[in-house]
Image (cartoon, rainbow, N blue to C red):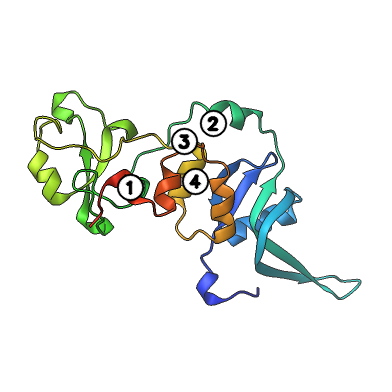
Amino acid sequence: MDFQSHIFSQEVLRTDIAGMPLEWIDYRAAASLYHGGQVAYCCGSPIYRVRGGYNAVTGLRSVIEVSSIVATRGDTRKVDDNRGRYTPPLNNRTLFKRDANICMYCATRFPTSALTRDHVTPLSRGGSDTWPNVVAACRRCNNHKGGRSPEAAGMQLVAVPFTPTYAEYIFLKGRRILADQMEYLLSHFPRTSPLHARLNGDLAWAGAVR
């Protein structure tokens, strides 16, 4: 297998045959899809060249060139039906990435280790642990707010929390996204997605970020 060590962990974006993003897979899973004839077409740039065995007749060695984006065959109707009702699982890593690592109260960017999950409507007051009710908050702001609503604590959200779409969640899960993969994912975000401004570095949505 020919590849540079620094891209050994680079993930491949798998889509359905209609081009809708499905998941991130490693090079082994991607090579299996190629070998099994499940890849309908490829997008993006080649990132891996996987070498297999030698042909007993020709003596030539098989080579699979894996692209950064692969579309796979299969029945997409069930995926399409479920995508509209899909609610992504909530965890801190994807939550903080949704909010661009910015505290939604003081509009300051922090490292992930300095952020906490804040419930806008506290759990003790009937709030839920769901995407529309949680935001990234620095420890200072979270401690100040305590078990109160933002209004009761004299605080104001700098952006409205939202539930990511399926394509947005695929982006949030990505650990090292290549430029062509990012461009592809962006094309599947809703036009009104707050992530457009956040990814373009437009910080007006979060006030004056210090």
Residue depth check, mark 4 versus mark 1: number of the one nearer the observer: 1
Mark 4, other Cα within 10 Å: few <14 / some 14–19 / many ≥20? some
Q: Earlier in the sequence, mark 4 or mark 1?
A: 4
Residue 138, which numbered label?
Answer: none
Judging by the rendered image, the residue that carries numbered circle 3 is: 192
Q: SS of the residue at dot 3? A: loop
Residue occupying the point 27% across, 37% down: 134
Residue occupying the point 19% across, 23% down: 126
Q: Are marks 2 and 1 in contact (CB under 8 Å)?
A: no
Q: Earlier in the sequence, mark 2 or mark 3?
A: 2
Q: SS of the residue at dot 4? A: helix
Q: Earlier in the sequence, mark 3 or mark 4?
A: 4
Q: Earlier in the sequence, mark 1 or mark 3?
A: 3
Q: SS of the residue at dot 1? A: helix
**Residue 27: image location, x then y, percent:** 60, 61
**Label 2 vs label 4: CA separation?**
12 Å
Q: Are marks 2 and 4 in contact (CB under 8 Å)?
A: no
Quadrant in which residue 62 is drawn: bottom right
Q: Mark 1 belongs to which amino acid?
A: Ala
Q: Nearer the viewer, residue 137 or 194?
A: 194
Residue 204, which numbered label?
Answer: 1
Q: SS of the residue at dot 2? A: helix
In the rendered view, would you say 75 is above or below 141?
above
Residue 170, which numbered label?
Answer: 4
Judging by the rendered image, the residue that carries numbered circle 2 is: 83
Mark 3, other Cα within 10 Å: few <14 / some 14–19 / many ≥20? few
Residue extending furthest top? 126
